[in-house]
Amino acid sequence: MLSSSPGVPVQHFEQFGITHEAVRRLLSTALARGADDADLYFEHLQSNSVALSDGKVNRASTHVDLGLGVRVVVGDSVGYAYTEDLSLEAMLRAAGVAAEIAAGAKSIRPVAMPMERRYSDRYPEGRPWDSVGMELRVGMVRDWEQRSFSLDPRVRKVEVSLADATRHILVCRPDGRLVPDIQTMTRAVVVCTAEQEGRRESSHYNLAQRDDISFYTPERTERLCRKAVDNTTGLFEAIKPPAGEMTVVLAAGSSGILLHEAIGHGLEADFNRKGISIYADKVGKPIAPAGITVVDDGTLMRARGSINTDDEGNPAEKTVLIEDGILRGYLHDEISARHYGVAPTGSGRRESFRHPVLPRMRSTYMEAGPYAPEEIIRSVKKGIYCSTFSNGQVQIGAGDFAFYVRSGFLIEDGKLTTPIKDVNLIGNGPKVLESIEMVGNDLVIDEGGWTCGKDGQGVPVSQGMPTVKVSKLSVGGSAR
Amino acid sequence: MSIEQLWELARTTLKDAQGMGAEEATVSLSRQTEVNLTRRAGRLEQATQATSLSLSLSLLVEDRFSGHSTSDLRPEALRSFLQKAVAATRALEPEPERRQPPLSDCGSSLTPEQLDLCDPSWEALTIDQRRDRLEELEKAVDALPQRSQILSATCYHMDSSGESVRVMSNGFEGMQRGTGYGWGTSITLSEPGGRRPEATSWYSSNHISELPGIEKIAQEAWMKAERRLGSGPVDSGRYPMLLDAPITGRILGILAGPLSGAELHQGRSFLAGKLNTSIGSKHLHLMDNPLIPRAPGSRAFDSDGLRAKAMPIVEDGVLRNYYIGVYYGRKLGMAPTCGGRSNWILRPGSRSPAEITKELPKCILVTGFLGGNSNGLTGDFSFGVQGQLLEYGVPTKNLSEMNVSGNLADIFHHLQEPASDVWTWSALRSPSLLFDSVDFSGL
């Protein structure tokens, strides 16, 4: 199955027989019917996990993925094919299939000599995950389990998992760009089930970052266990809040899910060039109160959503979406950048070699404002304060979005009172933006393992937010 | 790789794993060819075509369990992968409950021919025929009388063919194969104020002949999008809710988690201890049936290799079975039923949705969900919804920016009447469902 093509080997992919000559031949085949552009995306992923339940470290898994995706672009049309077989014959076949999107009428674009290019490294490789023995991993999850049990006698069950992934990628372009990257990721999850007076509650906490095993410092792992326990035991006193429109204060951190759903997806340029986003034709116009600045940033050190290169071989950047309330631009891949006549923003991402590139978010957050969080809470006569969140969803065209609140508090007369849980918040993106009344000075980038879904593809992202007051959102509480 | 080569590689891998120290192993190999086409604004927007091959493996080494998968099937890479997998498994703690079931419990209930999940015409389908189908669909959308009001229309076609083989060290060998077709369209409208409501009509089936015609798909997409024009919330309160048949899975599907052996064992199911007790009204009658020819959830054996069989989940409101696989059966001291859901069949009623709603002064017809989640331990749920306010069956307002909330232990007792309009295009075959009183939040 190994390629027999001779020539200059290509870094990590040398072991699979990939050479500069093979790259040129594949790109030439992809462009052979007269396409405007093409790219090759080689990927080799190794991931591992170990898990504890019922007091035993009793599950482990490994996953290996290897393959090539070939994309051929004609105007804004895309031909795509992939193969897990890296023999030259199989790769040429995939390139030929992807090329069928082109009509074969134009002149053939030449392929330049491949030249490796590297960008700033936001997650320097530390200790390789494949050098971390199973015994060490087993000891870590065992320790987190015992620590969680020790924090509260009401904890009845603890489940723990520790996962890592190391993804080698190589993006090859006809202009000669040959961009490698090593993308590591780790994630730890502690799930607790606790019991009080015959009632049970369950919740969790998780940490994720592009890092090696040194990420798990005593301070972090203490927080991992403590928050998992507190998130669980805090639910015993929680109620469903009343239903209806009310003032909502979003705690700093994972409430960035509001930005992700209400704004971020709608500013992905593919939706806008097709005219199906509610934010189409709004660049340069005010869409939020003055003072609100929202960015999507691929450059945060070791953040889950950070990338050195996007999956089209362009460097990641910090992209200002909304500046002082004015919509400044969209998140672009190369197709949309050409459409709008702007530079790509390094936002072309894909789940794996099996998927074509789309404009995607990386780390989306709102810049800090002037208010202390306590001041924001004090300003609310009656409303809710939302602390922890899970999933969200948006309708790009209508702008309606929703996200789920796992826990929080009622706000009564400027004070946090009764805990609340399990409510869906729903609103309309542009209306909610207009309804932001106060922005806190406490921006936090959430440390959890968020994954964004779009067109059946999941990519790791980060999000952040200072404490924010929204004058009205519909809260899915109890009507009684 | 031919089907014979799939079998050969699966058997060789099993033997190699045993040779390296695994006392038990299960090897599955699957191959899938898939074509996806998207068309917009009069031209092909995206064409994706590929054949994929992957191997998954579970191991029991000295009573220790692990699971693995790889798409790197080069012989030397696979051997190294197996060696590492076996070595990693040894570091875990033993769990004899993971042992495979006896061969006598395993087998295929029906042959692939009896399940009829493969459309023989797939082999002959050409790329030009696929493109032509999609173009015809786009023409049907363009021919809609309301076309001028449509801002954007995207049409989709997908088809696939796949097979998987499984070999287990207890001697079981099984194969599943199937084809799949899907097509549909998404349309976006515009309205004053800048909102651009969108809606999708999408159908899929194992057999191409069972897909509806292109005119139906185009008209349905328009009808769904039109329901979203000028939408907004109404007052919060308790309303009767008619859940549209194609989307009942968003509520019914929540039950799958709390019904599972894993959640029962972890003490995270609100259905724990509820076997043979009432969990809903007499209208809640739910069967799991994996043996329906051509149904998307059909299968000959389950994830443990156990013969697939039909079983009642809820009979006249009374919970009859959980999903208990071999492992959690041993943990819970219960006999295995099956590892997970197949086709869910909800018993229909005798009246149409229109006949039901024309008697109701007010009713919220829910036609779509947006976000939301549930808590399988407490049963609490909260979802964003879209739909229409009906007054004596007549739509009086299109709804959005509203939530429906409740508790699963309560809501099914409010199931007042299933309609007669069973939706047959998914593994959940359900009619529209009327609940007499449900919490909605809006204004």
Image: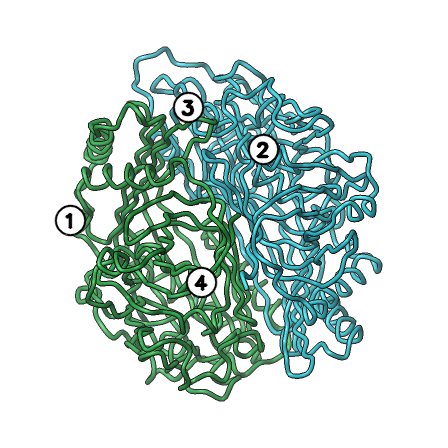
Chain colours: A cyan, B green
Disc sitting over residue A10 in the figure: 2
**Horizontal side of residue A239 vs B188, given as left or right:** right
Q: Are marks 2 and 4 on the same chain?
A: no
Identify the residue under disc 4: B438
Q: Give the amino acid type for the residue marked by disc 1 in the picture.
A: Ser
Q: Secondary structure at mark 1?
A: helix
In this view, the residue in front, A295 or B300, is A295
Q: CA distance from mark 3 to mark 2?
A: 24 Å
Residue that numbered label 3 is attached to: A73
Where does the N terminus of chain A fall, quadrant-wise? top left
**Marks 3 & 2, CB-CB < 8 Å contact:** no
Which residue corresponds to mark 1? B209
Residue A87 — which label?
none
Picture quarter with the C terminus of chain A: bottom right
Q: CA distance from mark 2 to mark 4?
A: 61 Å
Closer to the eye: label 4 or 3: 4
In the structure shown, which secondary structural element does the residue marked by tag 2 occupy? Answer: loop
Q: Element at badge 3? A: strand
| Local crowd size for mark 4, using a 10 Å CA cut-off: few (<14), some (14–19), many (≥20) | many
Q: Residue furthest bottom?
A: B333
- Most distant residue in the front direction: B361
Q: Quadrant of residue B137?
A: top left
Would you say the residues marked 4 and 1 are in contact, meaning their CB atoms lie under 8 Å apart? no
The 10 Å Cα crowd at callout 1, few under 14, some 14 to 19, many 20 or more, is few
The image shows residue B233, relative to residue B293, as above or below, that is: above
Q: CA distance from mark 4 to mark 1?
A: 39 Å
